[in-house]
Amino acid sequence: EIVLTQSPGTLSLSPGERATLSCRASQSVSNNYLAWYQQKPGQAPRLLIYGASSRATGIPDRLSGSGSGTDFTLTISRLEPEDFAVYYCHQYGSAPRTFGQGTNVEIK
Amino acid sequence: EVQLVESGGGLVQPGGSLRLSCAASGFTFSSYWMHWVRQGPGKGLVWVSRISSDGSSTNYADSVRGRFTISRDNAKSTLYLQMNSLRADDTALYYCARVPSPAATVDYWGQGTLVTVSS
């Protein structure tokens, strides 16, 4: 099973600042099948990025994904109020599919 | 509009059973693989099970294999999860989720149904 480790656990930033979230896999993610999800309290996760770098429908271009192999990054260029949430990385290239433990992006 | 509406959660004693349902609408249900993913209280997401679009292929996480059974009724656009021999660590919010193809990631999630296993 591929273990995904996200860092940091919590990121305290102000609106307008840049956020950089990391996801490291215990082994190479097949075909770079790495996704990022956003989850707000009481809500279901929302797909942001798939295939490591492709934005899902309706996702603004201030969010971007990068990386390959075992190291992946989600970058939010300028934080908007609606971006404060928990973010999960998820690998779907190998069975069983696994998720990281999450990074909480909170308002500083 | 894509909608996934879970139901069937509740409080059950250890060793008991529950059947979760997920009613789908707004898309051609029979064309999509479907998954169940759970989230323990204050915890992260954990993949549970998946089923092929025609129901012929299923997969399970090791933690639930032999106790849970995923199924679907394409005529009713409904996904199911039969959960037997429930344990305290099965307590979670259970989400049904849609996947556009076998190798793709989840693109839509339901709002979840809460399962609590406690005496």
Image: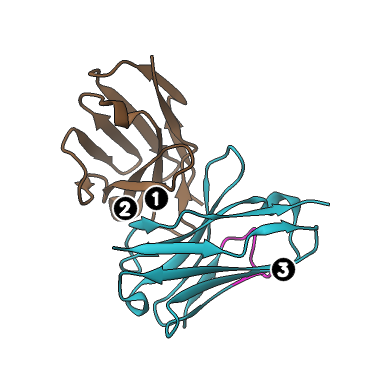
Q: Is residue B67 magenta?
A: yes
Percent from the top left, x then y, of residue A50? Answer: 28, 50
For the residues marked 2 and 1, what is the alpha-carbon distance in whole angstroms? 6 Å
Q: Would you name the residue on which mark 2 appears?
A: A33
- Kind of residue at disc 2: Tyr
Residue underneath mark 1: A91
Q: Residue at x 55, y 69 (%)?
A: B21
Q: Nearer the viewer, residue A101 or B8?
A: B8
Chain letter of disc 1 in the image? A
B11 with respect to B61 (left or right): right
Q: Are marks 2 and 1 in contact (CB under 8 Å)?
A: yes
Query: Alpha carbon of mark 1 to alpha carbon of mark 3: how far?
Result: 28 Å
Find chain A in the image and tell me its colour. brown
Mark 3 vs 2: CB contact within 8 A = no
| Chain of the residue under label 2 | A
Q: Give the quadrant of residue A26.
A: top left
